[in-house]
């Protein structure tokens, strides 16, 4: 693996925290993601199931966790099943985890090969009443492909119809929202690597280079610093492309006078950064660009102050909307009449700022959460307001990642330049 080994105690503690939420005589069964096919005999790069990683630290396909913390047989309480390797696999695919390495990563002593899973499961289930299974319950999930956990759910319900099946997702989502010190350190490292990439591109950006050249510069610095790569498909959007919220073509030339919006982050140890910066292609903002930029920056800074322990995200988004409305009124982009007559379900400010301000961040970029749970110390959020003026050919979004704390939030991206003067100075050195 490219990243440094993560402290095994993280995964031991995560399993302990989960065990406290389980009904008596329970077993948790969690499978790794599939290695997804492309065409012919090709496959996409493997991406681990973030919940399995959260509980084991194992970043390998064909892995299974079976966790029955109060099973009468101590050896069957926590088992990790790994893909058995051989000389042929080593030649074609490279090294796979040994049993000893599985223990070193996860802290689990009982490691078996995946071929033994069926027989072992039968022995465990005899002493269990409740079976916790995972299904992706993220509110924004669009699951069009049946994954390993879904296939296994169908099979075990057919093979063991008299057991009581329970949802694992709500328990894990509740735990994952609060980040431990180790997790925060991993997110900080992803942010640090993202900063290195951003600083490296500032003197490179100029008119007549291509968006994908900027993307390549980021990737170079990410990989050189042990990131796995991009946390998500990067948005490198020059000119009018910056008004396309999920623009990822990154295939246009940068032009004189344009702004360049870059929504990009590194992933390190499977934990993610999520940054957006908007910079002038020629190294100098125009007066109009400065005007809009400073309005977005004020909203971002104000939103970071609003996002405090005890608040509800739904109420927070409404307050940020009020702040943005005030800025748009000052800019003359909205009139008091438009605001007075606005549809509460789609407020007037949505014409220029149509997306949400914040989402949880962690093992997933749009990390899991439990609806209607109040903001709590230890959560990590993005803060990312924007103003998009398609009729003027540019959009501006600014985004930082913040750690919620009892005595004042911590901006995990405070070292990444964001003020106009600093960006211009760095671009013109």
Image: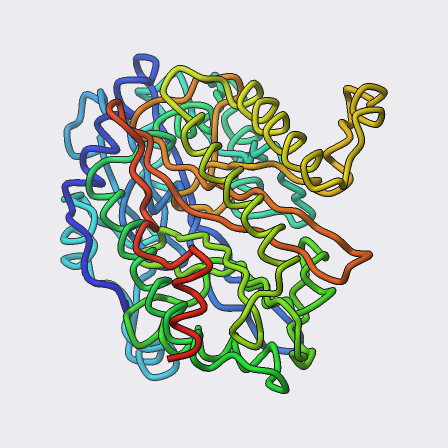
Where residue 172 sits in the image (x, y, percent)?
39, 29
Where residue 309 sits in the image (x, y, percent)?
36, 20
| Image point (40%, 53%), residue name | 273
Vertical relation: 36 (above or below) 292: below
Q: Determine which quarter of the picture holds residue 14.
A: top left
Q: Determine which quarter of the picture holds residue 98.
A: bottom left
Residue reaching furthest front?
Answer: 287
**Residue 262 left/right relative to 103:** right
Colour style of the rendered protein structure: rainbow
Where residue 416 sits in the image (x, y, percent)?
35, 58
Identify which residue, 55 or 405, lies in the foreground. Answer: 405
Residue reaching furthest top?
Answer: 24
| Image point (43%, 47%), residue name | 400
**Residue 77 left/right relative to 280:** left
Vertical relation: 355 (above or below) 34: above
Quarter of the picture containing the N terminus is: bottom left
| Image point (39%, 70%), residue name | 425
Vertical relation: 326 (above or below) 333: above
Quarter of the picture containing the C terminus is: bottom left
| Image point (65%, 78%), residue name | 254
Where residue 129 sits in the image (x, y, percent)?
39, 16
Identify which residue, 379 or 291, lies in the foreground. Answer: 291
Vertical relation: 295 (above or below) 395: above
Residue reaching furthest bottom?
Answer: 208
**Residue 205 left/right relative to 423:** right
Identify which residue, 194 or 94, lies in the foreground. Answer: 194
Identify which residue, 175 or 67, lies in the foreground. Answer: 175
């Amino acid at each position: 693996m490219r990243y440094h080994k993560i402290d095994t105690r993280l995964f031991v503690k995560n399993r302990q925290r989960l065990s406290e939420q389980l009904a008596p005589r329970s077993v948790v069964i969690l499978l790794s993601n599939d290695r997804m096919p492309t065409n012919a005999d090709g496959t996409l790069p493997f991406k681990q199931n973030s919940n399995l990683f959260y509980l084991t630290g194992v970043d390998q396909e064909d892995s299974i966790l079976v966790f029955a913390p109060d099973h009468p047989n101590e050896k069957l309480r926590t088992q990790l099943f790994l893909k058995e390797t051989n000389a042929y696999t080593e030649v074609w695919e490279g090294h796979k985890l040994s049993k000893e390495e599985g223990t070193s990563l996860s802290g689990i002593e009982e490691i078996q090969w995946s071929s033994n899973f069926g027989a072992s499961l039968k022995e465990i289930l005899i002493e269990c009443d409740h079976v916790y299974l995972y299904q992706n319950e993220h509110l924004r999930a669009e699951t069009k492909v049946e994954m390993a956990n879904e296939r296994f759910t169908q099979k075990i319900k057919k093979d063991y119809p008299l057991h009581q099946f329970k949802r694992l997702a709500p328990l894990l989502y509740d735990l994952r929202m609060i980040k431990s010190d180790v997790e925060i350190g991993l997110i900080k490292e992803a942010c640090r690597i993202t900063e290195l990439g951003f600083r490296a591109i500032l003197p490179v950006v100029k008119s007549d280079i291509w968006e994908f050249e900027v993307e390549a510069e980021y990737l170079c610095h990410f990989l050189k610093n042990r990131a796995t790569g991009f946390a998500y498909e990067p948005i490198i959007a020059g000119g009018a492309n910056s008004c396309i919220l999920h623009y990822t073509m990154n295939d246009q030339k940068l032009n004189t006078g344009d702004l360049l919006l870059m929504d990009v982050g590194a992933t390190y140890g499977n934990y993610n950064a999520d940054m957006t910066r908007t910079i002038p292609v020629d190294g100098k903002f125009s007066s109009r660009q400065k005007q809009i930029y400073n309005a977005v920056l004020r909203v971002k800074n104000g939103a970071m102050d609003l996002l405090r322990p005890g608040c509800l995200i739904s109420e927070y988004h409404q307050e940020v909307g009020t702040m943005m409305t005030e800025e748009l009124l000052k800019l003359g982009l909205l009139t008091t009449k438009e605001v007075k007559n606005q549809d509460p379900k789609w407020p007037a400010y949505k014409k220029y700022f149509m997306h949400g301000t914040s989402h949880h961040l962690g093992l997933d970029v749009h990390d899991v959460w439990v609806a209607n749970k109040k903001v709590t110390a230890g959560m990590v959020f993005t803060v990312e307001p924007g103003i998009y003026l398609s009729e003027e050919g540019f959009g501006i979004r600014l985004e930082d990642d913040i750690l919620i704390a009892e005595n004042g939030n911590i901006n995990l991206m405070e070292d990444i330049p964001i003020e106009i003067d600093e960006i211009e100075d760095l671009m013109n050195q």
